[in-house]
Amino acid sequence: MNAQIIDGKAFAQGLRERVAERTAQFSERAGRVPGLAVVLVGEDPASQVYVRSKHKATVAAGMASFEHRLPAETAQDELLALVASLNADDAVDGILVQLPLPAHIDENAVIAAISPDKDVDGFHPVNAGRLATGLDGFVPCTPLGCLMLLKDRLGNLSGLDAVVIGRSNIVGKPMAQLLIRESCTVTVAHSRTRDLPALVRRADIVVAAVGLPEMVKGDWLKPGAAVIDVGINRVEGKLVGDVDFASAAPVAGAITPVPGGVGPMTIAVLLRNTLVAAHRNAGIAFEAGTL
Ligand SMILES: Nc1nc2c(c(=O)[nH]1)N[C@@H](CN(C=O)c1ccc(C(=O)N[C@@H](CCC(=O)O)C(=O)O)cc1)CN2
């Protein structure tokens, strides 16, 4: 067997085009464009690339992009004051503080300061609670992107066994919640999990989000499993995922590559979430349709 490659880059491009069409319709009706504010603290090279990509994608979708770049030494109170001003700004529908933040800033305090109604990252505890309890709210972009790719490939996920490797607030936990919502049987594995290969071998769906280069091997997989690789690890100048693609591809039924799999979905879903936020803020019903 040789896995079908899940082309996240192409899927993300399609999603971005659909968001752009719906943004034009929204802007016509609301008399204003959706606005996304992105805050970057410090000079982390990868974060600078992501923030630049977000700016370009936001503008290309027909939205207003408000970029705030602060020096690495910025005091937490200064960042909280900026978040408060963005919360109060009617031109801003979505607020995103790029992570990771410098070590002297409490990430949780900053996330908690963002208005849950502008939290297009879906990281605020209110939105995490909404997801866990089945209420409408913002869902973190990367796991929602993974779910879109899975549903596009597999259709109905009901009854499938899923293993999520990694328990972060940003990917692992919300991914598990989304799969539960689709009626999968979900196991969340982490660094203390015993006999991870045996657990993975039972899964129809494997989502790897641990940040350990090429950790998941092909002989851990059930033949035909759908494998979603969230890892972005730089090894000797090369980008690799958390899955050992060379050994996994001959066993899996479908697999996301790195790069070009999950990564591009993050920004496409961010635009989608910003469009949803704009509808809510303007009091216009949002029809999800193909978004
Ligand atoms: N506030 C947030 N911070 C961070 C998030 C997030 O969703 N919200 N996610 C990541 C970084 N990220 C977006 O912010 C991101 C990561 C990867 C990609 C991407 O397209 N990756 C490409 C490879 C790009 C490369 O060469 O480095 C791919 O996988 O094909 C986009 C966005 C952490 N911080």
Image: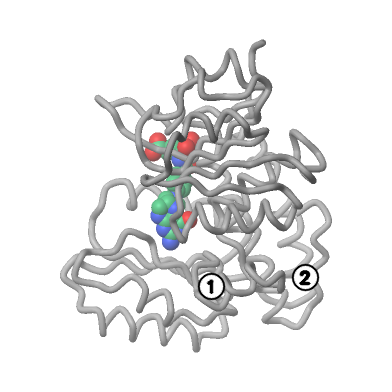
**Which amino acid lies under the numbered mark 2 shown in the image of this protein?**
Glu
Viewer-closest of 66 and 174: 174
Mark linked to residue 28: 2
Color theme of the render:
one colour
State whether residue 271 is above or below residue 145: below
User: Does 10 sit left or right of 83 as displayed?
Assistant: right
Q: Residue at x 32, y 59 (%)?
A: 100
Task: Read off the residue under disc 1.
Answer: 119
Q: Does the image show residue 52? A: no
Across and down, in percent, residue 145 comes to 62, 48
**Which amino acid lies under the numbered mark 1 shown in the image of this protein?**
Asp
Across and down, in percent, residue 184 comes to 72, 48
Helix, strand, or loop for circle 2? helix
Q: Is label 2's Cβ within 8 Å of ligand 1?
A: no
State whether residue 53 is above or below residue 42: above
Q: Residue at x 16, y 70 (%)?
A: 73
